[in-house]
Image: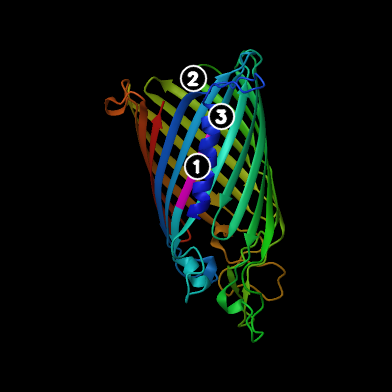
Amino acid sequence: MKKINLIILFVLFKILSAFSQSEEDNTGFKLKKLKFEEATLVSSYYTQNGNHSAVTGGIGTEKLNDSSNSFDLFFSHKDKKNRIHKIGIELGFDTYSSASSNNIDPSTRSSASGNDQRFYPSISWNRSNEKTGNSLGANISFSKEWDYTSFGSSINYGKSFNKKQTDVNVKASVFLDQWELIYPIELRSSSSGQGQFRQRNISKPRNTFDLTLALSHIVNKRFQLALIFEPNLQKGQLSTPYHRVYFKDTAKVFIENLPSTRMKLPLGFRANYFFGDHLVARTFYRFYKDDWGLKANTMELELAIKLSPFLTLTPSYRYYQQSAIDDFAEYKEHSIKEEFYSSDYDLSSFTSQGFGLGIKWKPLDGVWGVKHWDQIEMRYLHYDRSTDLSSDIVSLLFNFK
């Protein structure tokens, strides 16, 4: 993994060095020099605990720790038609451990349980025309984890009209995943012929197709609205092969079995109100429905309280409620006659609440007098779910311009 990371880093920096120089080759073509816009470093630590692990059929520890770091670079240049081109490069790296995944094979570290990593670089391009209000962009991404590899791409188009009071944005994305099928130890086949499934190194595709339609409007200088529709279609391996399921009418252990397609239809509404120079309220509501039978409602409120021209406090609250999918049941509540079954509590009926607090410092002369260090921000969020799961996350953001 380290060797792959170094190779990708080397290639990305070579691309950057090529773009950031103004050179003329033997064909007379002159490369445009990119202007550095900003760099952002985000580092976070997440921890959770619970007792409804899907790995052990809906019972057992859900303990998880995750350390995440991402670094974003943004460059721009103006072409002959005065269109602004922006290029963004992201490098992300997570390190995590999961006690629940230990139970895939308790005798080995054949999973994320010990200490695994996820690496996810991406590169984006966007071109905007101030005169016409049009924008066009594209993105490509890659993600590698212990049991899957993902390639993603997207295109987006935006149009600003009504004297820049109204914006319409359309984005289409596709993610092509290969998911390695890793089964619970007792269900793997052996030389004696026991077990239901073969050993590792078999993979199946899981493809995701996203469409985002967003309409935003500035009602007046204090009030802004946005409507967001995000249909999503997934096809392929959607059940997790190392999630066990226990039945009430047999002692045998089975693995989770879910439909191979899933259609999601979320509709969101955002409203921001500026009470004055010292207070902004940001609200969000989303209704979600899919063809697995899950329905959900999300409500969020965040306040931006300006304590001084350079210091902003951001308390937040999030409430979430969902119904269970049609094929969910608790430990030993499924019947062997059912076609599909899961005891993953992420697909159960529950409510959750999140309480957060952030603080942003953006001094005029730079953080601690460092001219190009534009701002520093720290956020904390505590999350509680009615299925006895709780989590905490703390994040630090550093921005340079």
In the picture of the structure, the residue carrying the numbered disc 1 is 91
For residue 286, which quarter of the picture? top right
Of labels 1 and 2, earlier in sequence is 1
Magenta region includes residue 247:
no
**Residue furthest toward the left?**
368
- Coordinates of residue 39 in the picture (x, y in percent): 44, 31
User: Which of labels 3 and 2 is toward the front?
Assistant: 3
What range is drawn magenta here? 87-94
Give the side of residue 33 with respect to residue 280, left or right.
right
Question: Within 10 angstroms of label 1, few (less than 14), some, or many (20 or more) residues?
Answer: many
Dot 1: what SS? strand
Asked if labels 2 and 3 touch by Cβ distance under 8 angstroms, the answer is: no
In the picture of the structure, the residue carrying the numbered disc 2 is 222
Question: Within 10 angstroms of label 2, few (less than 14), some, or many (20 or more) residues?
Answer: few
- Coordinates of residue 391 in the picture (x, y in percent): 41, 54
Identity, as a three-letter code, of the amino acid under mark 3: Ile
